[in-house]
Amino acid sequence: MTAARLIQARPRASDEVATLPNQPDVLDAANKLGVRFLVHFTTMQGAVGIIAARAVKSRARLPQDKYLEYVYSPNAECRKDPLWLDYVNLSVERINDWMFGTSRNRHAADGDSWVVLSFSSTVLTHPGVVFTTTNNIYPKCIRAEGLAGFKQMFSDTVIGRYGQVHNRYGKLPAWPTDRQAEVLYPGELSCDHLLRIDVQTERDMDTVHGALSGLELDEIEVRHAPEVFE
């Protein structure tokens, strides 16, 4: 897929984001590709905090939130994109398997389970959303807003980690060219857009159901789906 001319995105403060328009044409393009949802993985501990706060909060906002004070546990010990700490990292349709493996190894001693949160693709239209061609920390990453930025994620070729060239071979239409491509959501993402929570074990379903029911969020689907972590 060929994208229109790109303007490299920069981090925006929340007051600037509030002045930006929605981008409905991004959802039109996503629907044509069959993109149904965006995903965010976290530990069970992190998921309980997200449910309590009713939002996925950026790393910059997490330590300040009273609900998350005792459950804050970042996936990465040290972020290498410090200018983007006030953005939530999401993936399109499937998780970043490389990042998940890294995070899982880091938390191995904690013995915590993992969950994947799926959010409606409508959030792609929200003001200030940034699309990246690969992991945001990599030197060759291209970042852009709007339709051109979204399309760039699905380019015929993308340069990723260590200069590796990714192409569309073997990819479903709804999958970005590089599996490490990201959707950067400014500030915090409300659970009003949460569609489903996938867990690794059936036992974990009870924990999630308990957290949801206590906050009247019972309508959110909880699914035992170990395959989404692969």
Image (tube, grey):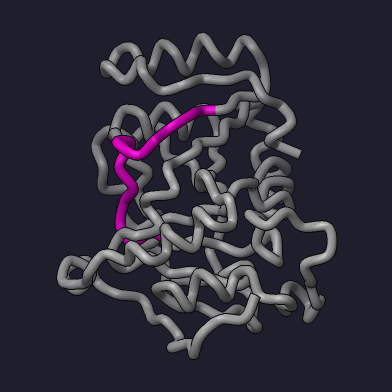
User: What residue is shown at x 42% (from left), y 58% (from top)?
Assistant: 27
Q: Give the quadrant of residue 65.
A: top left
Front in this rendered view, residue 50 or 18: 18
User: What residue is shown at x 54% (from left), y 57% (from top)?
Assistant: 32
**Please, is residue 147 above or below residue 187 in the view?**
below
User: Quick one: quadrant of the C terminus?
Assistant: top right
Number of numbered markers: 0
**Please, is residue 38 above or below residue 223 in the view?**
below
Front in this rendered view, residue 135 or 75: 135
The residues colored magenta run 185-197
Residue 196 on the magenta segment? yes
Q: Give the quadrant of residue 200.
A: top right
**Please, is residue 156 above or below residue 124 in the view?**
below
> Residue 159, image x and y in percent?
73, 79
Q: Is residue 169 left or right of residue 73?
A: right
User: What residue is shown at x 21% (from left), y 72% (from top)?
Assistant: 20
User: Quick one: quadrant of the N terminus?
Assistant: bottom right
Residue 195 on the magenta segment? yes
> Residue 152, image x and y in percent?
58, 76
Front in this rendered view, residue 83 or 193: 193
Q: Is residue 20 left or right of residue 25?
A: left
> Residue 195, image x and y in percent?
43, 32
Prevalent SS, magenta region:
strand
> Residue 8, image x and y in percent?
46, 86
